[in-house]
Image (spheres, helix red, strand yellow):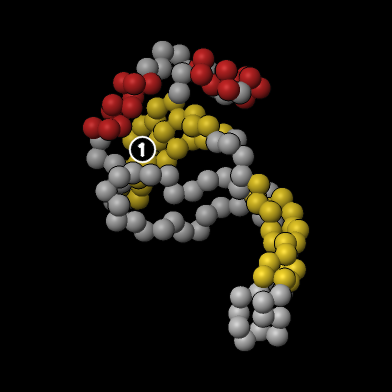
Amino acid sequence: MAFSPRKRARRPFGHVKSWPKTEASEVRIQGFAGWKAGMTHILARDLNPRSPSAGQETRIPVTVVECPKMRILGVRGYQMTPYGKQAVGEAWADAGQIADAFSDLFKRLPERKEHDAEKHFENLENSDLCEVRMIVAT
């Protein structure tokens, strides 16, 4: 099997084309960061009774996906307007928490003066939101 079309990728990271539709009442995370780290093989017993190798151990190629830990840096809320989704606001974690988790990332993030995360989060909860996205780092 091959990948089609055979061409250079537009960017070094992937993107999600569609998200699953859920009817759940609670809000939950629908995606996570992961990338292909390589391939290997495993030995597995063939359970198909019509296969020529039925009941025998066969080598199967498998893909190894690396999924590092994700830490939430902030939350951004969107509301639907006649022109599409528009950002209502965002709430970032405290600078001290980010500095403890990511010492090198803290230097690159813009400095937020007098950012009360709890107040911003309450404003998001009281807004009429159609979508909530998390700002995460690995």
Residue at position x 45%, y 14% from top? 113
Residue 83 percent across, percent down from the top left: 33, 50
Q: How many discs appear?
A: 1
Q: Quadrant of the C terminus?
A: top right
Query: Residue 23 at x, y = what percent?
Result: 29, 56
Identity of the residue furthest to the top in this view? 114
Q: Nearer the viewer, residue 118 or 23?
A: 23
Q: Quadrant of residue 134?
A: top left
Is 26 above or below relative to 76?
A: below
Quadrant of the rendering where the N terminus is positioned: bottom right
Q: Position of residue 106 (x, y in %)?
A: 59, 20
Q: Closer to the camera, 121 or 9? A: 121
Q: Residue at x 68, y 49 (%)?
A: 12
- Residue to which mark 1 is pinned: 77
Residue occupying the point 69% across, 61% down: 62
Residue 11, visible in the rendered structure: no
**Residue 7 image offset from top left, x and y in percent:** 73, 64
Q: Amino acid at mark 1?
A: Gly
Residue at left 49%, top 32%?
Answer: 72
Outermost residue, front side: 55
* In this rendering, position of residue 112 left or right of residue 48: left
Q: Residues within 10 Å of mark 1 (few under 14, many from 20)?
A: many
User: In the image, is residue 124 above or below residue 22?
Assistant: above
Residue 126 seen in render = yes
